[in-house]
Image (cartoon, helix red, strand yellow):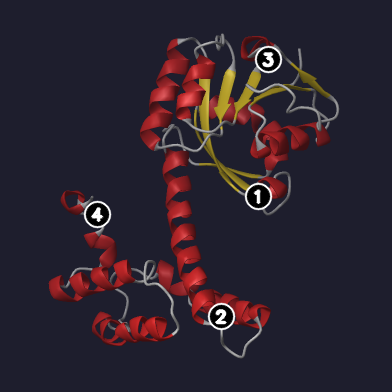
Amino acid sequence: MTDVTVLGLGLMGQALAKALVTGGLGVTVWNRTPGRAADLNDVNESATAASAAAASDLVVVCVLDYAVVTEILDKVDVSGRTIVNLTNGTPRQARETAARVEKAGGVYVDGGIMAIPPMIGQPAATVLYSGDADAYDRHATTLSLLGRSRFLGTDPGEAALVDLALLSAMYGMFGGVWHAFALTAKANLPRQEFAGMLVEWLTATHAMVSRPPDAEVVASAEMQLAVYPNLFDASRDEGVRLDFVRPMYEMMKEEVATGRPIAELLRNADEQT
């Protein structure tokens, strides 16, 4: 028996295993493609997922998607074990997997990793968890080796929901950043200097995110809508595509036309595509 088993040795799975070993734990690993454990020291590599899971009471799963999770868990005896699934997925998939694990006699904790592999085990890494509270508490010390842990509640889908929400903000921000770099590619401004200005600006405006809906209006939607087309014109002049910035303009027009905030408009499921 070992302290923990890691199923899946992609870049993230390897980072998880390394952090657990560094934390002084005995770790068993398995991967569908053999040989991925070659760069891992002091781990026990199993030939099958079933034998790997049998080696530990705590089994951490981190693979490509939930289809692979299902394929693996169908071959594993989860009875009496805690399954911590750190595979990115949807709240529905997390809840369905929790039900399958619990029906088979195991306990389930879902997780969302807010980090890239090199950050695992470092203070900057955060891992969100939800699901069986007792199981989380029992293994909290082990899980803390992966990064800062945050338990969001007993709904197995909560971690996946918050994970995707944070990723949504990240992708939107990255889209804006990429557009900004493309727009200033020919400017007489070093890229790193502009990057510093960008970070300062985003940091200075972050307080707007948490403003309550009834807060005093400090920048009207009508004014923003009036100046936004300048971004289109400047982009065209610089030969920059509008893929990232056009959708926001359409939402801003709808906000002004209806008088409803964009955050409220986005909650209208009938208008989703």
Disc on the earlier residue, 3 or 4: 3
Q: Which mark is residue 185?
A: 2
Q: Amino acid at mark 2?
A: Ala
Mark 1–mark 3 CB contact (< 8 Å): no
Q: Amino acid at mark 3?
A: Ala
Image height of 225 relative to 26, above or below: below
Q: Amino acid at mark 4?
A: Arg
Name the residue beneath numbered marker 3: 52
Distance between the alpha carbons at the discs numbered 3 and 4: 43 Å
Disc on the earlier residue, 4 or 1: 1
Image height of 93 relative to 161, above or below: above
Q: Position of residue 27 (x, y in %)?
A: 76, 24
Distance between the alpha carbons at the discs numbered 2 and 3: 50 Å
Identify the image quadrant of the N terminus: top right
Name the residue beneath numbered marker 1: 125
Tell me the mark number nearer the camera, choosing from 1 and 3.
Answer: 3
Q: Residues within 10 Å of mark 4 (few under 14, many from 20)?
A: few
Q: Position of residue 206 (x, y in %)?
A: 49, 72
Disc on the earlier residue, 1 or 3: 3
**Element at label 1:** loop
